[in-house]
Amino acid sequence: MRILIIHTFYQNPGGEDTVFQQESELLAIDNDVLTLTFQNKKGWKGALQTLFSFWNLAAAYRVRDTIKEFKPEVIHIHNTHYASGPIILRSIHNMGIPLVMTLHNFRLICPSAILYHDHELFLASIQEKFPWTAVKKKVMDHSTIKTFILALNYWFHRKIGTWNSVNRYITLSSFAKKLFTSSTLTIDPNKFVIKPNFTFPIDMSSLSFEDYFIYIGRLTEEKGILNLLEAFAKVDYKILIIGDGELKQSVQHAAQQHTNIHYLGFKSREDIIPLVEKAEALIVPSLWFEGMPMTILEAFSVGTPVIGSDIGALSELILPNRTGLLFNPQHVESMLTTLTCWKNYSQQEKFNIRQTTKEFYFSNFTPTENKKQLLQIYQEAIHDKKKIS
């Protein structure tokens, strides 16, 4: 199959970039794959990209030229924000090419993209035809202007039918699919399909684990890092924290004050995986609706259970006493109770959960399973495009 995959890289690398690269490499093994990328910029160049994202003719021409030369059977878009813009969807539609788009976040229904603002979940935009509440609350970078420009852009393309140009939208969980289909988007619910992310299997032979928990991710409020620090300050359970972000100093301070909290800074994936494999459990205390964290899938792939927030897609990934345990992310005491519950499990009980965790990975998140699902989605998009034509 001839597949064109399009992606816009953010200024700082993130999970969406990883998924784009992994899926492209996976599909290229036995398909004819071409990638077309754009790059978000900083400063005045970034400001111009944002303004032009309403109707970026340069991006549209670039996409058209690539299609004419490569002649793809299907096109898969991961991100258009903001260097390419939604116009490329219209260009693809007008050229008659079946189009699939992965929804890695919630930007299509809210300028916040993460449905979290001002220390709490922000859901007002889901049922608003124009997200005025988001604009008033400055949900994007605490700026009324930035929020309004983004809101107007996505509303404008909603009004002219751009988002209906997509033949299949990929959501990462049933929770995400429900949010999109219950919103004011007015897109045919049948266009939304569920396909989780994947990670490559890792050959780890150790059957034992050590006496510590581990956190990996951005050190930001919505990730629940402050609640994590508060919880571990009240117990002597050892935790390793890996990552970087705006709350780095808070983490460093906690590590200085409490001998059980260890901050390891930023580390490469090669250095992280052995630490995850040896951990009792990965801790994911998120306060917002995660998409499909790669850290969880990597933990599952080496048989490490996850203790995390009972919220959004995490509730679908973390199956109590099968792949980990859940707690209420709004209450530190709930996290503490869950950690203590885990500590009270016997070694055999923990070992059994590690086994079912790995089985869960091999049943759902391997490259083989992911490629099979992707190709099926592409075929559905091609079929629907022919039926419409």
Image: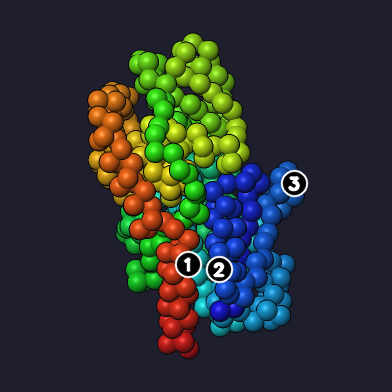
Tell me where residue 26 appears, x and y as whole percent. 55, 64
Above/below status of 104 relative to 352: below
Above/below status of 233 relative to 71: above
Q: Earlier in the sequence, mark 2 or mark 3?
A: 2
Tell me where residue 4 appears, x and y as whole percent. 61, 72
Q: Earlier in the sequence, mark 3 or mark 1?
A: 3
Under mark 3, the amino acid is Trp
| Marker disc for residue 27 | 2
Mark 3 burial class by Cα count in 10 Å: few <14, some 14-19, many 20+: few
Give the quarter of the figure containing the N terminus: bottom right
Tell me where residue 196 appears, x and y as whole percent. 41, 57
The secondary structure type at the circle numbered 3 is helix
Mark 2–mark 3 Cα distance, whole angstroms, equals 36 Å
Q: Nearer the viewer, residue 51 or 191?
A: 191
Mark 3–mark 1 Cα distance, whole angstroms, equals 40 Å
Tell me where residue 19 appears, x and y as whole percent. 54, 55
Residue at 71% x, 80% y is 69
The reply to whether discs 1 and 2 touch (Cβ–Cβ < 8 Å) is yes
Q: Which residue is mark 3?
A: 44
Q: Which residue is mark 1?
A: 371
Under mark 2, the amino acid is Leu
Q: Nearer the viewer, residue 328 or 347?
A: 347
Mark 1 burial class by Cα count in 10 Å: few <14, some 14-19, many 20+: some
In this view, the mark in front (2 or 3): 2
Above/below status of 285 relative to 111: above
Under mark 1, the amino acid is Lys
Mark 1–mark 2 Cα distance, whole angstroms, equals 7 Å
Q: Earlier in the sequence, mark 1 or mark 2?
A: 2
The reply to whether discs 2 and 3 touch (Cβ–Cβ < 8 Å) is no
Q: Nearer the viewer, residue 249 or 273?
A: 273
